[in-house]
Image (cartoon, rainbow, N blue to C red):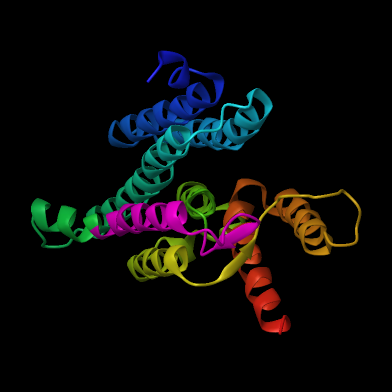
Amino acid sequence: MQLTSLFNLPNALTLLNLFSGCMAIVFVFNYRIELVPYCITISLVADFLDGFAARWTKTSSSIGKQLDSLADVVSFGLVPGALVYFMLLQLLERQGTSLSGLLIMAYSAVAFLLTLFAALRLAKFNVDERQSDGFIGLATPAATIFVWGILDIFLHNPHGFGWVVQSLFFLYAVTFLMCVLMIAELPMFAFKFKNYGWAGNETRYLFIILSVVLLALFKFAALSFIIVLYILISIAQKLIKP
C-alpha cells in the first residue's frame, strides 16, 4: 500500500479529530474541564469536513472509513464517557458518602457504558448499508453534543437548570437512554441536502430554525435541548410515515 493512500487530506482531518479527542481526555483527567468544549468543537468540525475532503480530492477509501470510526470511538465515545464519569465523581464526592474511593470510582465508571455502546454503534454503522441517506439510531457526535450541553448545565447552572442534572438518578438515566438510542432501530434524519429548496427539506429547515431559537435563549445549555428536539422529530417522522 502506497503512503499517499494513508497520508492525504481526509485522513489528516480524521487524525485531527482523533488528536483533539485525546486532548479532551487529558483535560478531563487534569481537571481543565473548561478546555474540553474547544476539543469537542475541533473534533466535530474535522469529522464534518473529512467526508467533504474525501469527495473533493476523490480519495475515498475503505481505510479512511475505518480510520474515521476509530477516531470517533475516542472523540465521540470515550470523551462523553469521561465527561459523565467526571460529573458522577463530583456528585458522589460532594455527597460525602461512606463509600471508599474505589467504590466511588466504580459507581462513576458506569459512565463508560457510553463508550462501549458508541463502539457498538460505529461497528454497526460500518456494515449497515441502510444508512447512506440517514441514520439508524443516534449518531455518536449527537450523543456527545447532548453530554456537552449537560456538562454546561452541571458546571454553570444556567437559568436554574442545575438542580435537574446535578442528580445521580438523572445522570444514570441519561447514560442508559443514550446507550439505547445509539443502537436503536430508529430512523433519524441526516443533513444531506439534495437541493436547498423547502420541498423535501421541511424537517431539516424546521429543526435548524428551532435550534437557532434555542441557542439564542439558552446558549450552550441549549445543546442538550437541541438533541432532544432532534430525537423527538425523528420519532414523530417514524410515527407519521406509513
Residue toward you, 130 or 140: 130
Vertical relation: 140 (above or below) 47: below
Residues rendered magenta in the picture: 110-138
Quarter of the image for the N terminus: give it. Answer: top left
Spot the residue most to the top.
Answer: 3
Tell me which corner region of the image, top left, top right, bottom left or bottom right, holds residue 31: top left
Quarter that holds the C terminus: bottom right
Picture coordinates of residue 53, whole percent (x, y): 63, 27
Front position in the image: 93 or 75: 75
Quadrant assignment, res 182: bottom left
* Residue in the foreground of this view, choosing between 177 and 50: 50
Relative to 27, residue 227 above or below: below
Q: Residue at left 48%, top 30%?
A: 14
Position of 109 with respect to 207 (left or right) is left
131 part of magenta stretch: yes
Dominant SS of magenta comes to helix
In the image, 94: left or right of 195? left
Residue 221, percent from left and from top: 59, 52
Task: Please provide percent x and percent y for residue 57.
Answer: 64, 23
- Determine the residue positioned at 43% across, 45% down: 76
Question: What x and y, as percent, mark residue 4?
Answer: 47, 15
Label count reads 0
Considering every residue shown, the one lying at the far front of the view is 1
Q: Residue at x 65, y 69 (%)?
A: 234
- The picture quadrant where one finds residue 213 is bottom right
Magenta stretch holds residue 189: no
